[in-house]
Amino acid sequence: MATSVELAAMRRAVIVSASGLGATSPNPPVGCVILDAEGRIVGEGYHLHKGAAHAEVNALAAAGSRAVGGTAVVTLEPCNHEGLTPACHQALLDAKVERVLIAVLDPTSRGEGGAARLRQAGVDVETHVLEKEALTVLGPWHASLSKKRPILHLLVQTDAAGGVLAPASEALAAIELLRPGHDLVIAPDGSVEEGRAGVHGRGFLVPAAPLPDEPQAVLAALAEAGARTVLVVGPSKMGEQLLSEVLVDRLTLLLPVPAPSQAATNARPPLPDGFVLSQVTRAGEQLIVSAERR
């Protein structure tokens, strides 16, 4: 069973993994922490972008010889195949770590997973360590694989009665805050931009042709480009279509703070059918309402 030191290291790995959000797709955002034989953190790393070294390799490079006899704590099962980079399970074996803690098993493993390969080599492996916490970062990537489409996050600013408004300063600020954590952003006019401009190299995730009008075709084009998470900014015809076809996974509403006492008989329902509240907070004179599809 994982020790308190190892659990703390896994939480650190989860936090570090978020540094890759908006840049790693179609690969997952992964974090890794290396503990030496005495349980001290001696290295950490994350996956920067497709084609770059994986989290384990970066963490091992930071740890150097101090990884010998130590523990690797990683948010996703180390890969078991060579692609653009070498297999991470082999890098861990070459570094002579004695124990590996894994939060989430890799659904894309080819044949035997990295955990099985490590166990066969005599490494002590523990899986599903703080899996739920690791999915706070890996969840959208993981869900996009099962849905076979990008995870869609719709952001809308409304008036007090629930009417959709063109993005004002509050919405623009929220967009700038949210966009780096998404692969792509679809603006109200239908244009597509990278969430973090330039990190993928010449914007390879942006579809070469204009997006089609049909939502399913849009998703196919985005998936083909390798996008896993997309922020859709309303008001737009595309946002409405995606909502009506039950394709929006997350929703962020920006609402004006209401008066302490007022009639609201004409107000629209706060959320579309099928969504549940996940967070409500206040920022200045705006309420920020976050919801997830049930």
Image: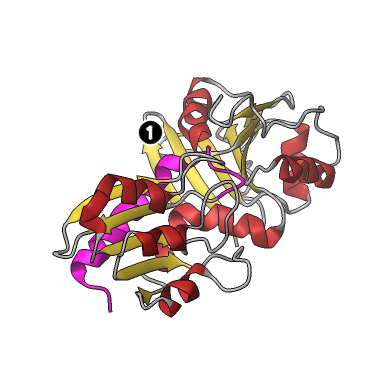
Q: Which of 174 and 27 is in front in this view?
A: 27
Quadrant (top left/top right/bottom left/bottom right) for the C terminus: bottom right
Instruction: Report x, y in % for residue 258.
Output: 45, 35
Instruction: Report x, y in % for residue 197.
Output: 55, 25
Helix, strand, or loop for circle 1?
A: strand
The extreme left residue here reads 38
Q: Which of 199 and 118 is in front in this view?
A: 118
Which of the 4 image quarters holds residue 283? top left
Quadrant (top left/top right/bottom left/bottom right) for the N terminus: bottom left
Q: Which residue position is annotated with label 1? A: 283
Instruction: Report x, y in % for residue 284.
Output: 37, 29
Whether residue 12 appears in this view of the structure is yes
Whether residue 130 appears in this view of the structure is no
Q: Is the magenta region chiefly helix, strand or loop?
A: helix
Q: Residue at x 45, y 31 (%)?
A: 177
Q: Left or right: 277 with respect to 281? A: right
Instruction: Report the number of numbered marks.
Output: 1
Residue 18 is a magenta residue: yes
The extreme front residue here reads 94
Q: What stretch is highlighted in magenta?
A: 1-27
Which of the 4 image quarters holds residue 72? bottom left
Q: Nearer the viewer, residue 191 or 127?
A: 127
Q: How many residues crowd mark 1 within 10 Å: few (<14), some (14–19), many (20+)? A: few
Identify which amino acid the numbered label 1 is placed on. Ala
Q: Is residue 77 above or below residue 193?
A: below
Q: Left or right: 34 with respect to 199? A: left
Instruction: Report x, y in % for residue 40.
Output: 16, 58
